[in-house]
């Protein structure tokens, strides 16, 4: 066992994954969505709920679903009744934090088989607009009186990044085009756009310059689930377990106006923690495929740099050269990402983990990247440019 | 469709008209009533007098605007208060065409982060006294061309009798034309 910065008892593998459809509005309740994804993950692992020792649930602000105690509420659909069950929450970073929390349940020796479920139903927060829920993220004393829209903060980060790195909007739009095209290979995808062009992105509605409508992922309903098991159990369950090789997470301060937004420190620190554990010292060479968090197109670039998959200001160049395409040397978001598959917040992050699981197993169908995959990475980010969560998986 | 996983993900897409929905306000007519805390209480009192106040830590040299009563890096109490100037430079700025509820605005507004000057102190890009506010006197082109980055701006205060001890006692930060 390679164990570079943490003490843990057991190696942990992913042995099954499941997803619902991602759509802007789904009939199913949050509990029903959780159940659909959880059941599919158990089926894929060839397990039933009886085999599960502990349950980890992830969901972003209660205010979207409109149900408080969302973890407790979701427990039934997520298989958590009469079991040690917890809900974890780090804003948009939650989806990747769910398998991280599930990992320590198993690595500690406390549980042998864990079901990890993430769900979001943004469509419930219908009036005046789903976005309105985000106003409770701002500081109530010094920010909320200015009546902000949450897109402001992303526009400020994107513009700062563009300014510092000399990036053009055309280069950033390439990410949206790539991911919305990639999504056409994903059975859950909400926004498959096979013919989208850079021009379409640049001509879409301007919301908060430099952010335009097609720079952003949609609001979505959906759920995702994975099953984790200890080494001994994993080898019993499947011939092709996908090992969790490294995990990392960090928070920065909510005082985002005191920090430089050009570079995502919150991701770098989380990545360093995960890389140390996974024994990775050259991520650009050692990571074969990555699913960095892409709620906005610039965020994919920003996060590639934070993850060390590109040097500072280099991600737009790699994108322009086609390196990040599915058949490229460093495929990025082959699933279609949040921009294409959709963004049911916590479920979207866990969808990325599921994608790496299927890519490592060679089960991604037409989404399967061209190069052989030994090691993959998923990352999410959340809150006020604050939270970074990273997971490294491989054979 | 693709032959790959997930196979037949389930769920039922619907349009609003197809099924009944049950609508409730968030919590009746409930409203939050936030306390300012110690540090921001004094900060807001300063704004009422036309001053932007901050705190500093002698341990690491950081200056906190908005102020905190602790240095979260050294994890000790701050060493005192200081006054930042009501001017500084724009470190990032954007043009908003939508309101908080995503309605289109009649006229776009510029908003950004202002790195404030503190006499006798220098700050790098990594940690600095800074606040978010409206920027007035900037055209759409100033923002889109990024000329606004690094521009000097100065607080445009409300008249003293109109101030209430709020961040909105500053109407905006106005671009200082040389
Ligand atoms: Zn200090």
Image (tube, coloured by chain):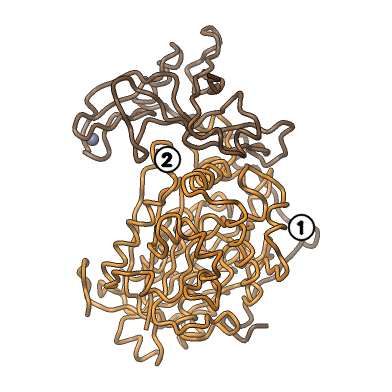
Chain colours: A orange, B brown
Q: Mark 2 falls within which chain?
A: A
Residue at point 66%, 37% (across, down): B99
Q: Nearer the viewer, residue A288 or B71?
A: A288
Q: Position of residue A115 (x, y in %)?
A: 43, 74
Quarter, ligand 1: top left
Q: Nearer the viewer, residue A52 or A339?
A: A339
Query: Is residue A147 among what the camera can see?
Result: yes
Q: Is residue A45 above or below residue A253?
A: below
Q: Residue B140 sits in which quadrant?
A: top right
Q: Position of residue B172 (x, y in %)?
A: 55, 23
Q: Residues within 10 Å of mark 2 (few under 14, many from 20)?
A: some
| Residue furthest out toward the right | B17
- Specify the label residue B16 is tagged with: 1
- Specify the label residue A369 is tagged with: none
Residue at point 66%, 44% (across, down): A207
Q: Position of residue A358 (x, y in %)?
A: 49, 81
Q: Residue B21 sits in which quadrant?
A: bottom right
Give the mark toward the camera: 2 or 1. Answer: 2
Q: Which residue is mark 2?
A: A256
Q: Is residue B138 above or below residue B6?
A: above
Q: Residues within 10 Å of mark 1 (few under 14, many from 20)?
A: few
Q: Position of residue B31 (x, y in %)?
A: 56, 33
Q: Residue B26 sits in which quadrant?
A: top right
| Residue furthest out toward the top | B161
Q: Is residue B146 above or below residue A352?
A: above
Q: Nearer the viewer, residue B142 or A273?
A: B142
Q: Mark 1 falls within which chain?
A: B
Q: Is residue B122 above or below residue A347?
A: above
The N terminus of chain B lies in quadrant: bottom right
Q: Is residue A21 left or right of residue A290?
A: right
Q: Secondary structure at mark 1?
A: helix
């Amino acid at each position: 066992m390679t164990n570079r910065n943490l003490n843990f008892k057991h190696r942990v593998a992913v042995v099954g994954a499941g997803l619902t459809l991602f759509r802007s509005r789904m009939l199913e309740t949050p509990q029903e969505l959780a159940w659909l994804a959880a059941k599919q993950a158990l089926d894929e692992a060839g397990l039933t709920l009886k085999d599960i020792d502990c349950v980890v649930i992830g969901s972003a602000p209660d205010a979207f679903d409109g149900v408080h105690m969302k973890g407790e509420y979701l427990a039934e659909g997520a298989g958590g009744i009469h079991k040690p069950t917890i809900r974890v929450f780090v804003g948009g970073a939650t989806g990747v934090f769910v398998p991280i929390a599930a990992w320590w349940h198993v690595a500690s020796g406390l549980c042998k088989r864990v079901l990890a479920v993430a769900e979001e139903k943004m469509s419930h927060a219908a009036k005046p607009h789903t976005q309105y829920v985000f106003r409770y993220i701002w500081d109530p004393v010094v920010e909320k009186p200015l009546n902000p829209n949450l897109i402001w903060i992303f526009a400020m980060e994107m513009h700062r990044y563009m300014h510092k790195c000399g990036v053009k909007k055309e280069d950033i739009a390439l990410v949206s085009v790539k991911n919305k095209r990639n999504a056409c290979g994903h059975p859950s995808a909400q926004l498959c756009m096979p013919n989208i062009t850079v021009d379409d992105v640049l001509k879409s509605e301007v919301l908060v310059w430099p952010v335009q409508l097609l720079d952003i992922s949609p609001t979505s309903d959906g759920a995702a689930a994975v099953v984790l098991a200890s080494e001994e159990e994993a080898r019993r369950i499947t011939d092709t377990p996908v090992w969790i090789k490294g995990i990392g997470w960090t928070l920065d301060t909510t005082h985002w106006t005191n920090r430089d937004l050009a570079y995502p420190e919150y991701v770098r620190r989380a990545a360093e923690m995960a890389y140390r554990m996974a024994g990775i010292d050259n991520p650009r060479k050692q990571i074969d495929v990555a699913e960095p968090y892409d709620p906005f197109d610039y965020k994919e670039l920003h996060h590639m740099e934070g993850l060390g998959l590109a040097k500072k200001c280099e991600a737009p160049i790699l994108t322009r050269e086609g390196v990040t395409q599915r058949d490229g040397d460093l495929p990025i978001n082959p699933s279609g990402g949040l921009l294409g598959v959709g963004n049911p917040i916590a479920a979207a992050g866990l969808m990325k983990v599921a994608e790496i699981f299927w890519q490592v197993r060679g089960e991604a169908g037409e989404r399967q990247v061209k190069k052989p995959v030994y090691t993959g990475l998923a990352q999410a980010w959340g809150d006020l440019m604050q939270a970074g969560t990273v997971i490294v998986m491989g054979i | 469709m693709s032959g790959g996983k997930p196979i037949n993900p389930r769920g039922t897409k619907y349009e609003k008209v197809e099924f009944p929905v049950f609508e409730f306000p968030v919590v009746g007519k409930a409203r939050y009533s936030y306390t300012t805390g110690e540090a921001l209480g004094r900060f807001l009192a300063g704004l009422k007098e036309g001053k932007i106040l901050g705190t500093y830590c002698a341990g690491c040299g950081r200056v906190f605007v908005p102020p905190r009563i602790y240095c979260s890096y050294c994890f000790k109490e701050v060493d005192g208060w200081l006054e930042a100037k009501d001017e500084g430079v724009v470190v990032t700025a954007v043009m908003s065409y939508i309101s908080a509820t995503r309605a289109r605005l009649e006229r776009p507004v510029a908003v950004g982060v202002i790195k404030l000057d503190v006499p006798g102190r220098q700050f790098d890009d990594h940690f600095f006294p800074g606040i978010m506010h409206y920027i007035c006197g900037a055209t759409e082109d100033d923002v889109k061309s990024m000329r606004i980055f690094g521009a000097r701006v100065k607080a445009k205060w409300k008249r003293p009798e109109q101030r209430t001890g709020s961040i909105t006692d500053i109407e905006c930060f106005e671009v200082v034309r040389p």
